[in-house]
Image: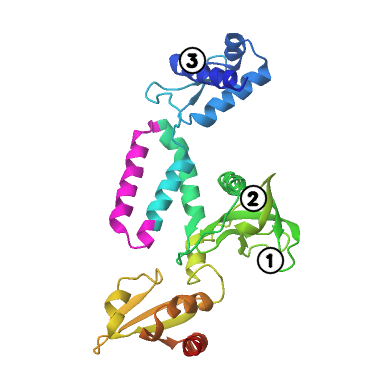
Amino acid sequence: MRYEITDRVLQLALAMQGSRVGLTLADIERDFAVSRRTAQRMRDAVLRNYPQAEQLVDDERRPRWRIPVAGAVTPGALTAEEIVDLEAAARLLRQRNLRARAAALEAVARKLRATLPPATQVRLEPDIEALLEAEGLAMRPGPRPVIRTEVIDTIRLAIKQGREIYIAYRSRHTRRASGRRLHPYGFLLGKQHYLVGMSPDRHPGDARLFALAQIERVSPQDKVFVRDPAFSLQKFAERSFGVFQEPPRDIVWRFSRDVADAAEEYVFHPGQSMARQPDGSVIVRFRAGGLMEMCWHLYTWGADVEVLEPAELKQLMGRALRHRRFRTAEL
């Protein structure tokens, strides 16, 4: 039975490509001997799998659907999500300073876009741009938690459609789940994966982070929300060194002469500035929050990095280094 359904959908796709004027729902009912509801489901299945399909309106104001000859009917027609995933991978490689590989992936993405028929490009472009804007890549790389695919897919669709969602969110401390309405604005992907959202009930106009691993269920709602035009996911992410949000501070680090060359190969923050000193050391400056995540990173540099500002981060690093020396002495 399943193979028969798949076969019918493929036959319908071929029929749509073979018709210059396109097929109406009545044509599908007649040609495949199915009910109106089944004809609608078959049409929807073709449109999901072949985004290059076009909708026309004939002289009798009846909608018709066809697949242009230039958009060959082959399984795996490109979707907005697939193009976005490719470009997101390129952005992640660029963040990790693998620029040649990033450029290669970006070139592949451009070539794939160019192969799409003009009408399909016009239709997919808003979805591609919306998803690229909505999926920021946090600065700090690291292990990735396991996230349920259906959670990501449902939220992605809601972002594209500008729809409100309802999530069951599990507290990290009590392990109990509570429900809340959210306006989804995007994702921050880093050591932990987060949804950036605003709750119209609990914190309207204030973006918060929700760990994707703690979202047990998500349901799309019928209500459409208006995205705050002043909100920028990129600026929201740049407020922090990693993902955890806290008030930004002026950050100043000094890397010793021994590791200065290595430090200059890093992009610690998009807004950073670097300056070589007469003694061969290098000073890095930027403005961001996330002191604990900075401390975790700076710990790997050991005594070759000195925190000049702020005082709170200097204290954190001092405690971390003293603890390491104490543990080393024990061993």
Disc 2 residue crowd, few under 14, some 14–19, many 20+, Cα 10 Å: some
Tally of numbered tags: 3
Q: Secondary structure at mark 2?
A: loop
Residue underneath mark 3: 15
Give above or below for 233 relative to 246.
Answer: above
Spatial distance from mark 1 to mark 3, Cα to Cα? 53 Å
Nearer the viewer's eye, disc 2 or disc 1?
1
Q: Tell me what residue is drawn at x 53 percent, y 16 percent.
A: 23
Question: Closest to the observer: 203 or 327?
Answer: 327
**Residue 109: in magenta span:** yes
> Most extreme residue toward the front, as rendered?
331
Spatial distance from mark 2 to mark 3, Cα to Cα? 38 Å
Give above or below for 307 relative to 180.
Answer: below
Nearer the viewer's eye, disc 2 or disc 3?
3
Q: Earlier in the sequence, mark 2 or mark 1?
A: 1
Tell me, for residue 172, which label it has, or none.
1
Question: Closest to the observer: 331 or 307?
Answer: 331
Q: Are marks 2 and 1 in contact (CB under 8 Å)?
A: no
Q: Position of residue 19 (x, y in %)?
A: 46, 14
User: Disc 3 residue type?
Assistant: Ala
Quarter of the rendering containing residue 281: bottom left
What segment carries the magenta color?
A: 93-118
Q: Tell me what residue is drawn at x 65 percent, y 59 percent.
A: 214
Q: Position of residue 170 (x, y in %)?
A: 71, 60
User: Disc 1 residue type?
Assistant: Arg
Residue underneath mark 2: 225
Q: Position of residue 79 (x, y in %)?
A: 47, 37
The scheme the figure's colours follow is rainbow
User: Disc 2 residue type?
Assistant: Phe
Q: Is residue 208 left or right of residue 233?
A: right
Q: Position of residue 168 (x, y in %)?
A: 72, 54
Q: Are marks 1 and 3 in contact (CB under 8 Å)?
A: no
